[in-house]
Structures are given as structure tokens and as C-alpha cells.
Image: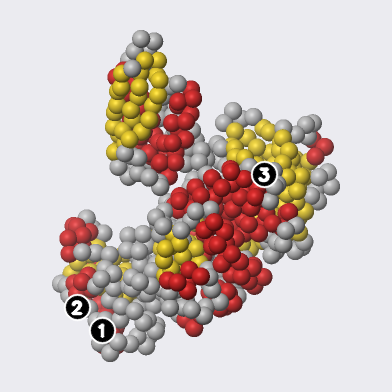
Amino acid sequence: MVQFSAREKGFHNEIEAVIDVDKDNEKLKKVWAKDIAENTIGAVGIKKWLRKANQKGSVEVDAISGASISTGAFRKAAIKAANEAGLIKVNTDAITGASQNDSHSEYNGIPKPANFPLINKLTTEKEIVKYDDTYDIVVVGAGGAGLSAAATAAENNASVMVIEKQGIAGGTTNYSGGVIQAAGDKWQKKYTKYQNDTPENHEKEYMKAGEGRVYQELVHDFTQNSPKNIEWLSKMGIKWTSVYGHTEIPYAKENFADRIHVYEGGGGNGIILTQALLNYSKKQGARFTYNTAVVGLIVSNDRHKVLGVVTEDHSRKLKYLKARRGVILATASIDQNLELAKDLSPQHYEDVKAHHCWSVQTDRGDGIVMGMSLGAAVTGFGGTIDFDARTGNGTDDRLPTIPSIFVNGKGLRFVNEDSTYAYGFRAIFNQEKQLNKPTYQIFGQTSISEKASPWSTESLDTDVKNGLVIKASSLKELSSLIDVPVNNLVKSVNTWNRNAAKGIDPEYDRTMGVKPFSGPYYAYKNTPGNLGAIGGLKINKKCNVLDIYQQPITGLYAAGLNAGGWIGSYYPGSGTAVGGVIHQGRRAAKSILGLE
């Protein structure tokens, strides 16, 4: 045998494809990878691709949707190596697109996600000649909620099928930090000073952050069970290594505690969590179908009960799956659906319209639309999960906002800058809509010497050069450059500096990073990065989907961000979404099985 290899740039680093060739028979014996960045989405996709390629004995198989950058790049490297070995004849320049994000084409072999249109009518049982398969539970979507539902159902001896649009599991949870909020557990006691925190106190904070828009039974169930969920995950190999807190929610400070749990290798790597859930689910007997969309629900002839789902794959073939005990919708919110965002969620609409949403492309609210087709109620829309990806402002109370202020289009301060990130971005959104002008973070040269500064002297100079940050020697000059009234900007900065010199902020009660700053002065335009919409199908505590008359739709459940009513008008802090999807996935499965 003879070896050939080639390298291509993946998302994280260069990846090498190596092939063993039987030159006598001109056949591929084996292909494998070197230099994969472990615990990444690309690593999962490449490993899955390698299984397919080695089973088929060819490198000319599709890359894996959902991991398109790295698997596309690796596929290109493998084809280059095979081309050099004389196994195939292809112009390798034609597959350059394989290493580009969201590049799905005949050249790079990355299958398009199964974003097929939903069936525009209900499918009734009398229309089904024969079901293609039958399971106790069918789960729609293999993100955090779907995986948790599958794991819980399977460990309780139910037969479960999970239908996933992408080629890998994990959904948007793969791109999360993977952190989870919980109160009163042993890890919080081990790693923080909050020895007497309770789920009840956690509930009070979430209820205040919900501003009257959340349903207490959902929040209560979530906070009461979060410690149990942390323990459950630890038993499948998740090792909790630290706990920290979110930044300020101005009117809920008395209920604050450090509750954000970080696992080994986490704090920015949700793939570790989703792979643990996936592997556990499969060991318990759960089955998965990838690159396939659920395009409709099957209902009883009187349309009062959900009996199963209709699926469609890339061959355009419809299949009919029966769910003996229930269907769980876990397809996220309306993250990438521009039309629904415009109708339901104005703040999220602004982000997705500007292509600032980083949720996976398959998060289009399919579950919400299917539920609505049965008369399901929706709730919780209006907010979004927004933060500034460049500065990381307001994400972590260990990294307080640098001495700086946010000003609106009139040069006036309008919010506590160290408030938790989505609270701050809701204020930013409202100011920008009211005045039709951008908002800015104003800071000085002295600000970047702070430990938590997102800029060094060198990186700040680079951002100024590239136009991402505006620099001026005086506030008068800066006001002209950002087009705000000079008197207002000067007054805003001087008021901050005068109070900050005393260590106080009587305007907005900020407590961290309260120091004066001086010139030269800088302005950074506040720019949202978006991790998904808030809002979904209305559910009860058992995760039954409710109709517009507040009655459960028999056989239909929703979990995670596919469901609304447990997060209010803004996202209240890291660890909420992942904690919520884990909990509701488990709750939905337990409810179907009559366990709680």
C-alpha cells in the first residue's frame, strides 16, 4: 500500500487528509484525518464523514451538513489526495467552495439542509395507507431539547426516533457556551460563596426578569429541577469545574447569586454537551434520522389528537411515522425565518434581517408553524438573545464593563452599561428605533488598561485603522464624527466622570467598572450578535402544547426554545437557554411516559 495526503484550511486550523491506496488494484483502502481540532463541530462532522467514506471505499461522498466549513475542507483535501494517487480525475480548483461557510453545491458535496416547505394541509389518519414505522415517541429536532427528550425517553425503555434536518446532532446548542444555570446544588456550594442559595430564590430572579410576561409554573418547574439536571448530566460524563454569575439586572439584584455552571472544556463549547447527550441517547437505544425534515403532523380524523409525523428527505420521498404516545417538537424558535420574525418579533427581525443571527440555518420555526396549524397558541415573542460578540460586554460578572458609557443618537446616556447583555441590547434597540440613529460605547485611552478590556493598545489601533472604532482628541471632535450634539455628549461624559470619581452612579446604579476616563476618546458602535429568538408555542407545566382556548392538544408537546412563556422580553443571562432546553426536553419525555 502507498500513502498520499493533502491539507486544507478548516474552521479552526489546517486539516490533513491521508489515504492508503492499494496500487495493484487501484483502490482506496482507508482514509483518515490528522490535526483535527477536538471537541468541535468540525471534528464531529469529519468523523462521521470518514465512516461514510471508508464504508463506501470512496472519497466522493457528501460532506456533512451542519459542519460545512471543516467537513467541506477535509473532503476537498481527501479528493486532492485521491486525485494525486490517480484514483479519481477531478479539477480540485472546482471544489474550493468546500472550505467556505454555507457553501452547499454540487462541487463541494455538502448537502443542503432539508428545509423543505411544510405541507400546507393537515394529514389525517384516514389518508395513511400504511405507516413506514412506529415508535412510542417521535422527537422533531436533535438540538439540546430534542437530545434531552430522546435520552430521557430511551433511558425509560421507550422506543424513540429523532428526526434532524442537518447531518449532525446538536443544532444551535452546538454553538452555545454549554453553560447552565442552577441554584442550591453541590457545585454551586463548592465553587462560590453562595452557600444558602435556593431554587426558590432563582425563581424570584427569573420572575422579576420576566417583567410579568412569563408563566410561573414553567419558571418554577425549571428552577426546581435544574439541580437535578446538573446531576443527571454529570452521570453521563459532564464534569462541572466552576460557577460564575451574570452581570446586573438592575431591579433584581437582591435575588442574584453565582449560578452559571461551566463544565470541563466548556464555557464556549456546546458540542461537548450535545455529544454527551447524543452518545448517551444512542446507548440507551434512541434512533436518529439525519438530513430529513418533518414537514407535517398526522392527526386523528376528528383532528383532536396528534398521531405522528410526515417526513421528507433529499430524495423527496414522504414517510409516515406513527408516535404511539406522543410527538415532541424541539425545532427551536423562528431564528432564521425572516417572514415570521417580521410578524412576531420586531427586535429579532432587525437582527435576522441584517444577517446577525448565528443560529443554525435550519432553525426556521417549523414546529411553531405546525403547532399553529392545529390551533396552537403562541406566547413570549418580542425579545431576542442579543450580545456584542466583539466586546463580550455584559456576559460575565468576572469581567465588568470597562469605564465607559453608552450614548444614544442625541449623545445622552440611557442604560446601565454593565447590565446583563440582552437587557442592555433591548435598551439599545429601543433607543435606535426611537431616534433612527445608532448608539455608541464611549470610552477613553485610560479605559483599555482595565483587566476586562476587550481591547489592547494594539488591537484598538487596528480597529481604529479599520474603521470599527472612531478616535478623537476631544469630545467636541468625537461628537462631530458620530453626529451627536456636542453639549449633550460633553455633559454625559462629565456627569459620569464626576460621579465615578466618587465611586457612584446615581443615574443608573451601575456598581462595577465605575471609574472616570479621559482622552483621547473613542466611540464603538454597539453591534448585536444574535443567538436566536425568544418565543414559541404556549405550553403547560407538562409541556403539552395548548390551543388558543388554553386546552392541551392531545399527543403534542413542545420543549426548549420551541416553547414560549418561560423567558420574558429579554434574555436574562447565560445558562438560561441551555438550562431550559435540557429541562423541558426531559420534562416533555417524562410527561408523555407518565413519570411525573
Q: Is residue 225 above or below residue 111?
A: below
Residue 25's image quarter?
top left
Q: Residue furthest top?
A: 24
Q: Which residue is mark 1?
A: 497
Neighbour class for label 1 at 10 Å: few (<14), some, many (≥20)?
many
Left-right relation of 203 to 554? left
Residue type (three-letter) at the residue carrying disc 2: Ser
Q: Position of residue 462 (x, y in %)?
A: 19, 57
Q: Position of residue 563 (x, y in %)?
A: 62, 59
Residue type (three-letter) at the residue carrying disc 1: Asn
What residue appears at the point 68 percent right and 33 percent down from the top-left corner?
Answer: 319
Front in this rendered view, residue 169 or 96: 169
The C terminus: image quadrant: bottom right
The tag earlier along the polypeptide, 2 or 1, is: 1
Q: Which residue is mark 3?
A: 160
Figure label count: 3
Q: Indicate the secondary structure of the residue bearing disc 2.
A: loop
The tag earlier along the polypeptide, 1 or 3, is: 3
What residue appears at the point 39 percent right and 83 percent down from the top-left corner?
Answer: 508
Residue type (three-letter) at the residue carrying disc 3: Val
**Can residue 420 be seen?**
no
Q: Which residue is mark 2?
A: 518
The tag earlier along the polypeptide, 2 or 3, is: 3
